Amino acid sequence: NLYFVKQGEAGITGSSGFGGIVGNIKSGTVYNCISSVKIKRDTYTAASYIGGIAGRMDGGIIDRCRSYAFFVDATSSSYSNTGGIVGRMNGNGASYSMVRYCVYDGSFATAGTGIGGIAGCLEQNAIVRECINRAPIGKLRTTAGSSYTGGIAGLMDNNSKVLYVYNSGEINGGSIHA
């Protein structure tokens, strides 16, 4: 279990799996964390699996975390599978990935595909429950060309669930969901 508070600026120079607290969760629990980072992509290639708490989950739980992450794009390329809490969630075989009791209060100043206030993409056996998004998604930048943009989840697939959530953030994107 992790208990962590992180502040500052993080520049992304790689292309995949970057989080304000953890890059990739394979199993285990991230508990009661706060992330207040500015996540800025520094390269000219698209970046994927980016999250305020974790970039990617392949099993495990993110529980009672809060993210104030501010996503900004320094170039004209876009993010994909990017979320205020987690970029991409995927259960590993019969197991599941879960985000519960989390809040996102940051902001997106970027465009892309699969952008959500809590999770960018929910794949096999992914569950988001009792979470809140208050952040504007795509508010600070014209997001024409963005697709699969949602207050809670950008894209859901394959036995995933979103339960008992609340969104009050303004959504600006080309194709709006959840």
Image: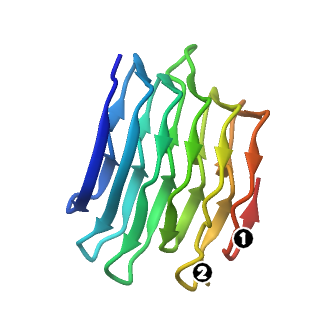
**Near-viewer residue (42 or 160):** 42
Q: Amino acid at mark 2?
A: Gly
Mark linked to residue 145: 2
Q: Give the secondary structure at mark 2.
A: loop
User: Horizontal and vertical percent for residue 110?
Assistant: 47, 73
- Determine whether, in the image, residue 178 is placed left or right of residue 108: right
Where 159 sits versus 134, above or below? Answer: above
Residue at 34% over, 35% down:
24
User: Horizontal and vertical percent for residue 119?
Assistant: 57, 46
- Name which quarter of the figure residue 43 lies in: bottom left
Return the residue at label 1: 175
Q: How is the image coloured?
A: rainbow
- Name which quarter of the figure residue 13 lies in: bottom left
- Name which quarter of the figure residue 144 lies in: bottom right
**Near-viewer residue (91 or 20):** 20
User: Horizontal and vertical percent for residue 142?
Assistant: 57, 86
Sequence-first tag of 2 and 1: 2
- Determine whether, in the image, residue 166 is placed left or right of residue 38: right
Residue at 62% over, 66% down:
136
Q: Amino acid at mark 1?
A: Ser
Residue at 25% over, 60% down:
9
